[in-house]
Amino acid sequence: MSVEKKDRRSFIGMAFGAVAGVGGAFALVGMKKAWDPLPSVKAAGVTTVDLSPIKEGELYQVEWRKKPIFILKKSKDMQSNPTRDVVVADARYTVCIGLCTHLGCIPYWKPSSQQFICACHGGIFDSSGINKFGPPPRPLDIPPFKIDGTKLILGEEGPEYKKLIAQTKGA
Ligand code: FES
């Protein structure tokens, strides 16, 4: 092979490598952008719920970050649970993520027995979201929240949330 041909080949090789390298870098930047949530999504990750129209014993469901959130205004005959109840203006609420802690099915509220029932494998949670029967290994998870007057702000960690979490962990 002539020196000239060899030089030409190595130049093409280097040029191809450089183009591939730059392309790869752009691809990585593109992928990183796709993985990172957009700032507007983060801002939209907060859901505000007015609790005042909810009636006693009524389950209210909202969506927060694509997850169902159960908000149950406890009636007087429902057992209070100081480690789970969210107290707002003398009313007690159960606020939890409506995904079964076994395999993630959405339980339904059965008013007659005051239980959340998971039809997938028969898991049962009480009105505070505590697992009482079947395979669920733990209570329904509590989403981060903040209380502002009669409003529940999902997605922000207020003192009420921190207190519940500390109590749950036995701190
Ligand atoms: S997913 Fe709920 S009991 Fe299995």
Image (cartoon, helix red, strand yellow):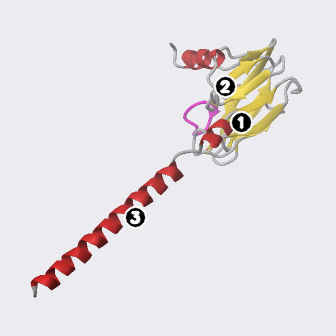
Q: Nearer the viewer, mark 2 or mark 3?
A: 3
Camera-side residue: 100 or 136?
A: 100
Q: Nearer the viewer, mark 3 or mark 1?
A: 3
Q: Is residue 136 magenta?
A: yes
Task: Give whichever of discs 3 and 1 has the lower sequence position.
Answer: 3
Which span of residues is magenta-colored? 132-139
Camera-side residue: 38 or 64?
A: 38
* Total count of labels: 3
Give the residue at x 57% y 40%.
135
Measured from the top left, where is residue 87 in percent x and y? Answer: 74, 15
Q: Nearer the viewer, mark 2 or mark 1?
A: 2
Disc 3 residue lies near ligand 1 with CB under 8 A: no
Three-letter amino acid code of the residue under disc 2:
Phe
- Which secondary structure lies at badge 3? helix
Task: Give whichever of discs 2 and 3 has the lower sequence position.
Answer: 3
Q: In the rendered image, is residue 126 in sight?
A: no
Ligand 1 is found in which quarter of the picture?
top right
Task: Give whichever of discs 2 and 1 has the lower sequence position.
Answer: 1
Give the residue at x 57% y 15%.
167
Give the residue at x 52% y 15%.
170
Res 145 label: 2
Q: Circle 1: is it few (<14), some (14-19), or many (20+) Cα within 10 Å? A: many
Res 69 label: 1
